[in-house]
């Protein structure tokens, strides 16, 4: 037994002497460097995460130019990149992969990942109030108190140049639409534009909207209308914007009383087409859209006679429209009057808005965007802040009550108003 013990100790002593630094079992782990460059993305890429998966997993964020460096253990990796970035009012989702990245000891491996982009508008139409409200005396309605609310549907600041607002023809969804061909398609669909009818409006300079924040644009009656009609809207707010440009020819005093409290720097500019003295957004069923002119100012675009198109094949000024490229359009919403849905026809093409939302006018109602339940609940800062039980929204989330509670709301944006909007009983500004 004693002899056996001595032999075991000798073996251990031999092993401790023989097993040196060159033995893989105890040597330092070998490593190499991987430098990743992203291509195919034109914006700030600092929000894109790059991951190497292999022996271990490593994740870092790219810099603004789309570069990142890893010091990793040797082995074979797959590289993936994914993230979002904002540019010119759009949110881009970018993804890319590169497989079989072999990392050897003390080597610098340079790889390029070609990114593929998909885009959604960063700024969307959150709400449109246009149908009017009951007068206090119980008879009739008041409808010169319209507004549009734009919203930054992302966690990144939005800066938009050349932002414009327009609606298409005809005024009402149930009106006789002469722009359909024998093939059942809108005549302008194949040409890639949407006609802007009755003129257009644009912001004087760049518009900045903070993450998960909104901008109120008064369409008509930029005053405290509640002084006369208690169910109307008070627009006497210096943070609001107003469609107010008498020099354009939109001079109807009942539509455009001098704004109260709203500074002149927040007045939108306009180009009038036709004979009307007001930009008469339908009070039953408008088809509204927002867009950015590219490589031309809104004023220059509006004055370019080559961009004119005539509704229904007409030739007079009353039929004139601006041809707005589909690629310029950030968002759109098509509305049908609730009692005339069967008589209504689409005016916006499917790539702008594939559906419609119905609404009852003259009751103070509004069309309001649905909450993206999954995306909203996924925001960690919303824990304990979301208010539920709101049945008009398929998500069940009361967006306005939740925002007052400090929550950030992500709204649905599928380019289909049937999925994205509902009729709300009163404007959120009340």
Image (cartoon, grey):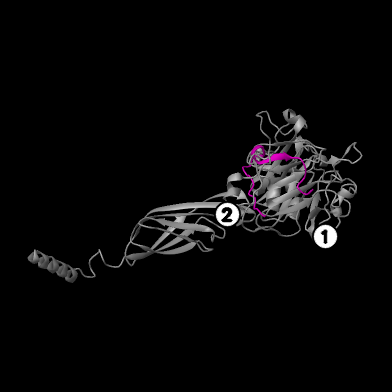
Residue drawn at x 73%, y 51% is: 164
Residue 90: x %, y % from top left: 62, 52
Compare marks 2 and 1 and give the one earlier in the sequence: 1
Residue 419, quarter of picture: top right
Residue 174: x %, y % from top left: 76, 32
**Could one spot residue 376 in this view of the protein?**
yes
In the depicted structure, whether residue 426 falls above or below residue 104? above
Query: CA–CA distance between discs 2 and 1?
Result: 39 Å
Residue 264, quarter of picture: bottom right
Residue drawn at x 12%, y 69% is: 10
- As helix, strand or loop, the secondary structure at mark 2 comes to helix
Task: State if disc 1 and disc 2 touch (CB < 8 Å).
Answer: no
Residue drawn at x 61%, y 45% is: 373
In the depicted structure, whether residue 160 falls above or below residue 286? below
- Discs 2/1, front: 2
Please name whichever residue, 292 or 243, is drawn nearer the observer in this view of the structure: 243
Q: Which residue is mark 1?
A: 264
Q: Which residue is mark 2?
A: 380
- What are the residue bounds of the magenta stretch? 406-430
Q: Is residue 43 left or right of residue 114?
A: right
On whether residue 41 falls in the magenta region, the answer is no
Residue 425: x %, y % from top left: 76, 40
Residue drawn at x 55%, y 57% is: 42
**Could one spot residue 290 in this view of the protein?**
no
Q: Is residue 179 left or right of residue 70?
A: right
Please name whichever residue, 185 or 332, is drawn nearer the observer in this view of the structure: 332
């Amino acid at each position: 037994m004693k002899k056996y013990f001595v032999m075991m100790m000798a073996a251990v002593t031999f092993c401790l002497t023989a097993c040196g630094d060159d033995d893989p079992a105890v040597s330092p782990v070998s490593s190499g460097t991987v430098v990743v460059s992203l291509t195919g993305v034109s914006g700030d890429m600092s929000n894109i995460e790059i991951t190497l998966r292999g022996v271990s997993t490593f994740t870092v964020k790219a810099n603004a130019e789309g570069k990142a460096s890893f010091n990793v253990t040797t082995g074979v990796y797959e590289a993936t990149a994914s993230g979002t970035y904002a540019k010119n009012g759009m949110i881009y989702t970018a993804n890319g992969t590169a497989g079989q990245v072999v990392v050897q000891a003390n080597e610098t491996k340079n790889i390029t990942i070609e990114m593929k982009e998909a885009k959604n508008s960063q700024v969307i139409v959150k709400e449109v109030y246009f149908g009017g409200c009951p007068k206090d005396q119980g008879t009739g309605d008041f409808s010169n108190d319209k507004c549009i609310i734009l919203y930054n549907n992302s966690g990144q600041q939005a800066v938009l140049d050349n932002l414009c607002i327009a609606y298409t023809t005809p005024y009402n969804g149930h009106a006789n639409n002469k722009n359909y061909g024998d093939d059942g398609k809108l005549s302008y669909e194949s040409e890639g534009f949407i006609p802007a009818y009755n003129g257009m409006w644009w912001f004087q300079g760049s518009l900045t909207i903070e993450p998960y924040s909104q901008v109120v644009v008064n369409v008509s009656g930029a005053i405290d209308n509640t002084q006369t009609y208690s169910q109307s809207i008070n627009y006497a707010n210096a943070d609001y914007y107003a469609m107010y440009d008498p020099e354009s020819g939109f001079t109807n005093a009942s539509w455009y009383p001098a704004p109260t409290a709203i500074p002149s720097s927040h007045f939108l500019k306009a180009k009038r087409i036709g004979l009307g003295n007001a930009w008469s957004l339908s009070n039953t069923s408008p088809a509204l859209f927002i867009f950015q002119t590219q490589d031309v100012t809104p004023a220059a675009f509006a004055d370019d006679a080559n961009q004119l198109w005539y509704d229904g094949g007409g030739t007079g000024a009353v039929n004139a429209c601006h041809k707005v490229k589909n690629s310029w359009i950030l968002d759109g919403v098509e509305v049908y009057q609730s009692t005339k849905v069967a008589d209504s026809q689409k005016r916006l093409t499917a790539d702008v808005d594939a559906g419609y939302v119905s609404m009852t006018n003259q009751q103070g109602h509004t069309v309001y965007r649905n909450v993206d339940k999954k995306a909203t609940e996924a925001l960690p800062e919303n824990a304990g802040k979301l208010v539920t039980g709101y049945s008009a929204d398929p998500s069940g989330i009361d967006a306005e009550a939740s925002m007052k509670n400090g929550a950030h709301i992500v709204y649905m944006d599928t380019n289909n108003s049937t999925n994205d909007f509902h009729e709300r009983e009163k404007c959120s500004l009340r």
